[in-house]
Image (tube, helix red, strand yellow):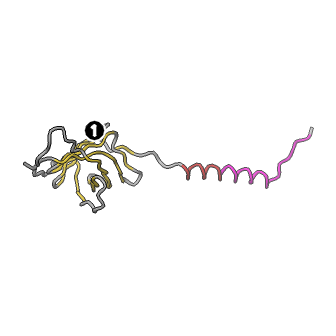
Amino acid sequence: MTHASRSPGASRAGWAACSLLALLASVGSAPPPQQLAPGQWGGEHVELRVEEQRSRFEFDCAHGQVEGPFLLSEDGRFDLTGTLTPEGGPTRQGEERRLPARYTGSVTGDVIKLQVQVGDSRDAPPEHELRRGQPARLRKCG
């Protein structure tokens, strides 16, 4: 009875091919996003209430909302699409004041750095700093 022999080079080539395939599979797949835990965040002129499937923002003269979970990338960044509704001032009955908004920033520990881009505005939005569990300091428009 004879055994088919494998050359050491063939075994190493097979191992290298398997290793290469595993490496390529891991490079092509991004880690799943993380969800920010529900809770309240506050800062100067802004409050954020994170829920499982919605986030609500309260500003001095506006309020906003993002539907769906508050997802973070591996490095703590977020880029969420939602709405912003201005408050105060005259309005016509039935007038829609809700505007499209983009909420971007990062979370590091108990601090959120937040920017809100409204509509098609090209202006650089101010950055807000919020802290987990801290009450907001709002000055509501009358």
Q: Position of residue 31 (x, y in %)?
A: 47, 48
The answer to whether residue 52 is above or below residue 112 is above
* Residue that protrudes farthest toward the left in the picture: 142
Q: Residue at x 64, y 50 (%)?
A: 21
Q: Of residues 3 and 100, which is closer to you in this image?
A: 100
Highlighted magenta segment, given as a residue range: 2-19
**Is residue 16 covered in magenta?**
yes
Q: x and y percent of residue 26 in the render?
A: 56, 50
Which amino acid type is shown beneath numbered disc 1? Glu
- Point out residue 35 in the picture as x, y percentages from the top left corner: 36, 43
- Quadrant that contains the N terminus: top right
Which residue carries the number 1 mark? 51
- Hey, which quadrant is residue 45 in on the image? bottom left
* Residue 88 visible somewhere in the drawing: yes
Q: Is residue 97 magenta?
A: no
Residue placed furthest toward the right? 1
Residue 108 is left or right of residue 48, and the answer is right
In the image, residue 44 lies at what x, y percent?
A: 16, 55
Any part of residue 133 in sight: no
Question: Height in image: 110 above or below 92?
Answer: below
Q: Secondary structure at mark 1?
A: loop
Q: Quadrant of residue 52?
A: top left
Q: Is 49 in front, or is 26? A: 49
Residue at the image position 35 percent from the left and 51 percent from the top: 79
